[in-house]
Amino acid sequence: MNVVVDLNRCQGYAQCAFLAPQVFTMHGEESLLYTPVIAEDQDERVRRAAAACPVQAIVVGKEAGSGAR
Ligand code: SF4
């Protein structure tokens, strides 16, 4: 599965890093690092992280792979 984070929208709340630490990690106070292609066993965690993001910056699945942003 693909994941894209709109880093312009991301406010560094770190909800995603808390819910899916293998995919999202905070680098310093506000910058987020993430893995754009995730293993299947991380799908559920990433979906939860996307749902938990306060600013809906995380896009997962097909939409993330389209390169629309
Ligand atoms: S939960 Fe959303 S706003 Fe917070 S660090 Fe992750 S992507 Fe950014």
Image (cartoon, rainbow, N blue to C red):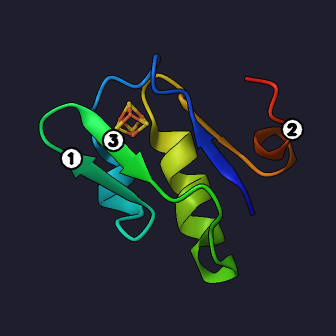
Q: Position of residue 7 (x, y in %)?
A: 46, 26
Tags 3 and 2 touching, CB below 8 Å: no
Q: Are marks 3 and 1 in contact (CB under 8 Å)?
A: yes
- Examine the rendered structure and indicate whether residue 57 appears above or below residue 62: above
Which residue occupies 34% across, 66% down?
21
Left or right for 66, reference 28:
right
Q: Position of residue 63 (x, y in %)?
A: 83, 39
* Residue with the mark numbered 2: 66
- Image spot of residue 28 (x, y percent): 13, 41
Could you tell me which secondary element the residue under label 3 belongs to? strand
Q: Seen in the image, is 23 located left or right of residue 15?
A: right
> Secondary structure beneath disc 2?
loop
Other residues around mark 1 within 10 Å, as few (<14) / some (14–19) / many (≥20): few
Q: Amino acid at mark 1?
A: His
> Could you tell me which residue is drawn at 47 percent across and 22 percent down?
55
Q: How far apart are the alpha carbons under marks 3 and 2?
A: 21 Å
Cα separation between marks 1 and 2: 26 Å
Q: Is residue 21 left or right of residue 29?
A: right
- For residue 53, side relative to residue 29 (left or right): right
Q: Position of residue 35 (x, y in %)?
A: 51, 59
The residue labelled by disc 3 is: 32
Q: Which of the marked residues, 3 or 1, is nearer the chain's N terminus?
A: 1
Up the image or down, 5 lies above or below 40; here it is above
Give the residue number, with chain letter if any, for mark 1.
27
Q: Quadrant of the C terminus?
A: top right
Identify the residue at image location x=69%, y=79%: 40
Residue at the extreme front: 67
